[in-house]
Image (tube, rainbow, N blue to C red):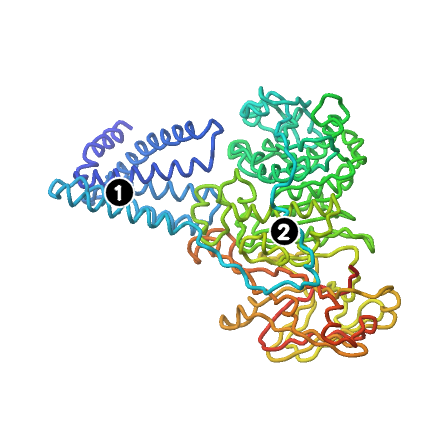
């Protein structure tokens, strides 16, 4: 052992013999590069002590590790009989390993982490050369100054290019005036009500005064131990928050209109963001708008259920998110019956909406369908008196909880999702949309809006612009996403219009959900696709994995002619998972036709009154076409309705079939394939558009056309190649 120690001491004395002044300065480049990587990686793993102390902690950690590890690497390299700058090489090696570790910790693939680590090592080498340039004694000060100015200009120019550019909208023509006869005033503008903003909460919050000493209304804690095991609530989480699963707080931010009321109520809850970066203040832009228009809006705090790199995430967090929403409503019920409380007699409990973002969007639907999970929970007694009329989901998740998913019945439902969402990057809300059902004849409806350039984080002002935490978020493509302000304007328009219609019966806003173009004067330019269905919809053809392509209920039959492919298939998202429904996939090379024959039985039993609209839902599948030249080829479809007379016209007369939206998630197209396993590889997915065709508009083309006499409906597909999936078709009354 003594010989080994002596040998190491001897090697240590000579280990840096080749590290000249040049290489010493090059090593400083590695030191700075590794320090920057440490800080960026550390910001993605906050300690909860605050930004300043996070910077101090991670930079101090860098100082210690860089000194110790590079010395160790230098000592190991000294055993190689090579005349190389070992201290510098040890510093380079440390920098590369550090970057690789940080990216692997952020759950990127090994290949991606290795590629970036090598690139970062080369960058640190270049940085060292720049430092050597400024340290050189034989280069004049003026020359160094010119170089510095050019370097600053280059950096500023590069930073400017990374900002999002102006994003053109999708030219989809003008909406039918038969649908958009009275679009009403912009629902995204403030209303006439003055409002107050206050908080309710435990009064003991360790991190936010608004829920601590400055809270206006005190609330009791609630016990979630029925759903969260004690061992799943670590001591670190208790240390950070000051409570356990047995005494969770009920904290909320309130925007309340002035006046007697009662007012409709909406609760909104955030999703799973890094626990130490609080999320509940991020919906003030919605709370303020809705309060000005006569709603009580509450942003619910569930940050203590979010993920932390230090203490993980509680088990059953999704159930507890929904359970806490219900407990908030029950507490507000108590407040509304308590004289002197700000909520006293202010809430209209027959007009309640639940909204959520990401996991919060799923929690809102689960809370509305609470009996599926909480039927035997005595702590929720009395919740049946709360009438949840509407659910709003912003980029929601849709995971299976206890083998079940929410199934809303006779509940208004709205989902918004972004095509540039790098977190929930599949249109998961499409699945919840499919599971919403209505009693026949009900005026309640479900609606979706797919916003091509929208991302995940911009729905919340506290979440920044990156859908992934640092350092992974640095590699996301942010040049082609909507500005945060524009995305929130869209959200304000749709959420406000939806609540005006669902809770106040303002039917002038219905056209916005039938055809997004009815609100194009209110909406920023972007790519939009929308779906809509109400209890007024009467199916003509629908598809399941076991149904026939030719025979349907009530004697309705169909026939095809000229298609190169015609099969019933499950609709799938961009990761190949089922959307929960099926459709008829049709592909053609030249001209083809799909004809539906209405039976007398269908007409007699399903069309009790004259139909006013023909409704269909289809998706463009251009990405599946064989060659790159054939992609982005908008399908050309004409509809022919035959009865006592025939009327034929292009579908584009009502709305063109939108091209598929292609997303480049990362700064380089190649990174989409390697940064995450099976997540970003597919650039597009099937997104369904609903077409609502007013039959009385056809009478303008041919006055002899009688909607009561329709016997055949033919889809003429031409100008191939083309590929679509037809989800369903049917009729609707107003």
> Looking at the image, which residue is at 55% across and 71% down?
633
Query: Residue at the front extreme?
Result: 192
Could you classify mark 2 by the number of other residues whose Cα lies within 10 Å: few (under 14), some (14-19), or many (20 or more)? Answer: many
Q: Is residue 242 left or right of residue 447?
A: left
On the rendered structure, is 604 left or right of 473?
right
Q: Say which element carries label 2.
A: loop
Q: Nearer the viewer, mark 2 or mark 1?
A: 2
Which residue position is annotated with label 2? 428
Residue 675, placed above or below residue 240: below
Locate the C terminus and report the quarter of the image it occupies: bottom right
| Residue 89 numbered mark, or none | 1
Q: Earlier in the sequence, mark 2 or mark 1?
A: 1
**Position in image of residue 548 (x %, y %):** 76, 69
How dense is the environment of label 1, judged by Cα within 10 Å: few (below 14), some, or many (20 and up)? many
**Total tally of numbered discs in the picture:** 2
Q: Give the label on residue 289, or none.
A: none
Question: 193 or 387, which is in the foreground?
Answer: 193
Horizontal side of residue 123 vs 440, given as left or right: left
Gap in angstroms between the C-alphas marked 2 and 1: 48 Å
Q: Outermost residue, left direction?
A: 138
Kindly tell me whether residue 678 is visible in this rendering.
Answer: no
Tell me residue 438's x, y (percent): 79, 52
Residue 146 placement (x, y as % from top left) = 19, 46
- Indicate the quadrant where residue 143 lies: top left
Secondary element at tag 1: helix
Question: Height in image: 418 above or below 305?
Answer: below
Q: Nearer the viewer, residue 446 or 510?
A: 510
Location of the N terminus (image quadrant): top left
Q: Would residue 160 be visible to someone looking at this image?
A: yes
In the image, taking residue 493 as reference, residue 106 lies left or right, namely left
Residue at screen point 68% across, 23% down: 219
- Where residue 111 sits: x, y (%)? 43, 52
């Amino acid at each position: 052992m003594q010989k080994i120690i002596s040998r190491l001491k001897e090697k240590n004395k000579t280990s840096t013999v080749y590290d000249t002044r040049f290489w010493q300065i090059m090593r400083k480049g590695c030191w700075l590069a590794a320090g920057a990587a440490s800080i960026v990686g550390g910001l993605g793993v906050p300690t909860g002590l605050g930004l300043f102390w996070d910077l101090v902690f991670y930079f101090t950690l860098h100082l210690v590790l860089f000194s110790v590890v590079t010395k160790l690497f230098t000592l190991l390299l000294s055993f190689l009989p090579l005349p190389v700058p070992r201290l510098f090489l040890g510093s380079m090696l440390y920098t590369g390993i550090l970057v690789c570790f940080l990216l692997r910790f952020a759950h990127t693939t090994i290949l991606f982490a290795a590629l970036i680590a090598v690139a970062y090592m080369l960058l640190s080498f270049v940085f060292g050369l720049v430092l050597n340039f400024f340290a050189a004694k034989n280069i004049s000060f003026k020359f160094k100054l010119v170089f510095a100015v050019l370097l600053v200009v280059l950096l500023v120019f590069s930073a400017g290019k990374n900002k999002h550019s102006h994003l053109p909208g999708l030219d989809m023509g003008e909406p039918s005036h038969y649908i958009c006869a009275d679009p009403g005033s912009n629902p995204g503008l403030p209303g006439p009500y003055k409002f107050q903003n206050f908080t309710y909460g435990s009064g003991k919050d360790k991190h936010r005064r608004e829920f601590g000493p400055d809270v206006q209304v005190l609330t009791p804690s609630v016990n979630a131990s029925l759903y969260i095991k004690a061992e799943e609530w670590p001591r670190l989480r208790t240390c950070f928050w000051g409570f356990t699963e047995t005494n969770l707080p009920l904290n909320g931010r309130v925007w309340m209109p002035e006046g007697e009321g009662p007012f409709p109520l909406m609760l909104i809850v955030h999703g799973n963001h890094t626990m130490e970066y609080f999320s509940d203040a991020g919906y003030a832009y919605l709370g303020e708008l809705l309060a000005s228009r006569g709603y009580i809006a509450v942003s619910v705090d569930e940050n203590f259920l979010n993920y932390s790199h230090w203490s993980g995430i509680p088990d059953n967090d999704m159930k507890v998110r929904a359970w806490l929403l219900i407990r908030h409503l029950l507490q507000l019920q108590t407040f509304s019956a308590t004289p002197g409380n700000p909520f006293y007699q202010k809430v209209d409990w027959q007009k309640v909406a639940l909204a959520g973002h990401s996991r919060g969007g799923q929690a809102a639907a689960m809370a509305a369908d609470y009996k599926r999970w909480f039927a035997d929970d005595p702590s929720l007694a009395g919740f049946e008196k709360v009438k949840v009329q509407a659910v709003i989901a912003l980029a929601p998740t849709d995971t299976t909880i206890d083998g079940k998913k929410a199934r809303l019945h006779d509940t208004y439902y709205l989902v918004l999702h972004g095509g540039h969402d790098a977190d929930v990057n599949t249109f998961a809300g499409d699945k919840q949309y499919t599971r919403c059902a209505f009693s026949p004849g009900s005026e309640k409806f479900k609606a979706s809006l797919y916003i091509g350039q929208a991302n995940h984080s911009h729905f919340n002002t506290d979440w920044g612009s990156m859908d992934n935490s640092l350092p992974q978020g640095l590699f996301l493509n942010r040049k082609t996403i909507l500005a945060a302000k524009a995305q929130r304007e869209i959200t304000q328009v749709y959420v406000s219009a939806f609540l005006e219609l669902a809770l106040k019966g303002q039917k002038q806003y219905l056209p916005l959900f039938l055809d997004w173009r009815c609100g194009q004067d209110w909406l920023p330019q972007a790519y939009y696709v929308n779906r809509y269905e109400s209890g007024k919809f009467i199916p003509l053809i629908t598809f399941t994995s076991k149904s026939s392509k030719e025979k349907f209920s009530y004697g309705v039959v169909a026939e095809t002619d000229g298609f190169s492919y015609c099969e019933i298939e499950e609709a799938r998202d961009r990761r190949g998972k089922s959307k929960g429904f099926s459709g008829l996939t049709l592909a053609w090379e030249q001209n083809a036709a799909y004809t539906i024959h209405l039976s007398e039985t269908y007409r007699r039993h399903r069309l009790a009154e004259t139909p006013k609209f023909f409704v269909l839902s289809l998706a463009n599948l251009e990405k599946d076409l064989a060659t790159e030249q054939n992609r982005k080829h908008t399908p050309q479809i004409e509809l022919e309705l035959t009865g006592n007379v025939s009327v034929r016209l292009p579908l584009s007369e009502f709305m063109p079939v939108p091209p598929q939206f292609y997303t480049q998630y990362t700064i380089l197209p190649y990174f989409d394939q390697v940064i995450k396993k099976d997540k970003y590889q597919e650039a597009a997915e099937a997104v369904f558009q609903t077409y609502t065709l007013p039959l009385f508009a056809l009478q303008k083309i041919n006055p002899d056309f009688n909607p009561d006499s329709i016997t055949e409906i033919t889809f003429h597909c031409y100008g191939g190649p083309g590929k679509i999936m037809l989800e369903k078709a049917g009729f609707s009354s107003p």
